[in-house]
Image (cartoon, rainbow, N blue to C red):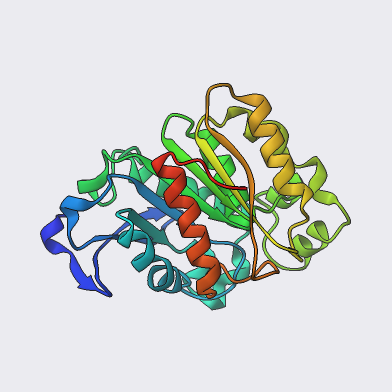
């Protein structure tokens, strides 16, 4: 069992590290929480990053987003997909492997991964997912699979992919690239038709000004399918983050990060977000 007393302090945060095994590979899970834990708001956010090839990218997630979100009182979880634990093995994995990783971590964080709980002191806290780009696409499927587990879903510039890209046989590389480069191949993605109707979590969808990677129609389709499929949940239409155009920047642009953090804070506190 992981204990709060084992936490180290770094950059104004308390940090715990636990792990689970997925496909025979150990996935470390880093949990960040406020130093003054008594003032935590009892909400957890699991961050699922996008399609980067960078090894151990969760270190960047931890250092860039951790102080801001824990400063707002959140407990934050971050991890690396198996594809990003060792750069030399990146192309041994694909989109389906990442989905398995995120689903396994999400289940573990709620104590339902073969009875194994990650960072046990927090397993009773509501669990939400913040999925960025490719991570948003994966997060939507996980929120649909664990409809009773995921409390809130935050999709930041969410991508979408043709179902062929999600095949277990397709790994990152030429075959994956060929699928996703087909014009408008994402339009038939089952993330809209199959996953969205099952999601019960409250949803916040954030888009970027002049996004050069994710067409504006993609977040629009997320919003329309979520809103039409579930009654009684709190869905907020896409909120556009301006001032830093383009797709990249969620993990290195402080202005963009701070604007997204404000939207997240307002979303969780129930404030009406301005257009």
Q: Position of residue 172 (x, y in %)?
A: 68, 64
**Would residue 250 appear left or right of 180 to someone viewing this image?**
left
Q: Residue furthest bottom?
A: 88
The relative height of residue 47 versus residue 274 in the rendered view (above or below) is below
How far from the left and from the top, in percent, is residue 38? 16, 51
Above or below, comparing residue 72 to residue 256 in the picture: above
| Left or right of 180, for residue 89 | left
Q: Residue at x 56, y 32 (%)?
A: 199
Where, by quadrant of the figure, is residue 156 drawn? bottom right
Q: Residue at x 50, y 34 (%)?
A: 201
Q: Residue furthest right?
A: 183
**Residue 101 at x, y = what percent?**
49, 52
Residue 182 visible? yes
> What residue sits 75% from the left and 64% below the top?
210
Closer to the camera in the image, 200 or 147: 200
Determine if residue 1 is in view. no
Q: Position of residue 166 (x, y in %)?
A: 68, 49
């Amino acid at each position: 069992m992981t204990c709060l007393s084992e936490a180290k302090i770094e950059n104004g945060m308390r940090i715990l590290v636990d792990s689970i095994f997925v496909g025979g590979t150990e996935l470390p899970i880093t949990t960040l929480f406020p130093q003054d834990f008594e003032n935590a708001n009892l909400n957890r956010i699991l961050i699922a990053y996008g399609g980067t090839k960078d090894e151990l990218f969760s270190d960047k997630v931890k250092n860039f987003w951790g102080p801001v979100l824990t400063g707002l009182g959140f407990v934050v979880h971050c991890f690396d997909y198996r594809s990003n634990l060792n750069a030399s093995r990146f192309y041994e994995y694909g989109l389906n492997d990442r989905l398995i990783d995120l689903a396994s971590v999400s289940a573990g964080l709620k104590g339902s991964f073969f009875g194994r709980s990650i960072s046990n002191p927090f397993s009773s806290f509501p669990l939400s997912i913040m999925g960025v780009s490719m991570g948003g696409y994966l997060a939507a499927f996980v929120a649909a699979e664990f409809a009773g587990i995921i409390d809130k879903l935050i999709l930041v510039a969410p991508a979408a992919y043709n179902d062929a890209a999600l095949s277990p046989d397709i790994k990152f590389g030429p075959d994956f690239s060929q699928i996703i480069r087909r014009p408008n191949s994402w339009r038939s993605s089952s993330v809209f038709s199959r996953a969205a109707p099952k999601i019960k979590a409250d949803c916040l969808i954030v888009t970027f000004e002049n996004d050069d990677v994710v067409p504006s129609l993609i977040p629009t389709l997320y919003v329309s399918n979520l809103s039409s499929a579930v009654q009684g949940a709190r869905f907020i239409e896409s909120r556009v983050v301006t001032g830093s155009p383009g797709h990249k920047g969620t993990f290195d642009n402080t202005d963009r990060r701070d604007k997204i953090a404000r939207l997240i804070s307002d979303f969780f506190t129930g404030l009406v977000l301005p257009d």
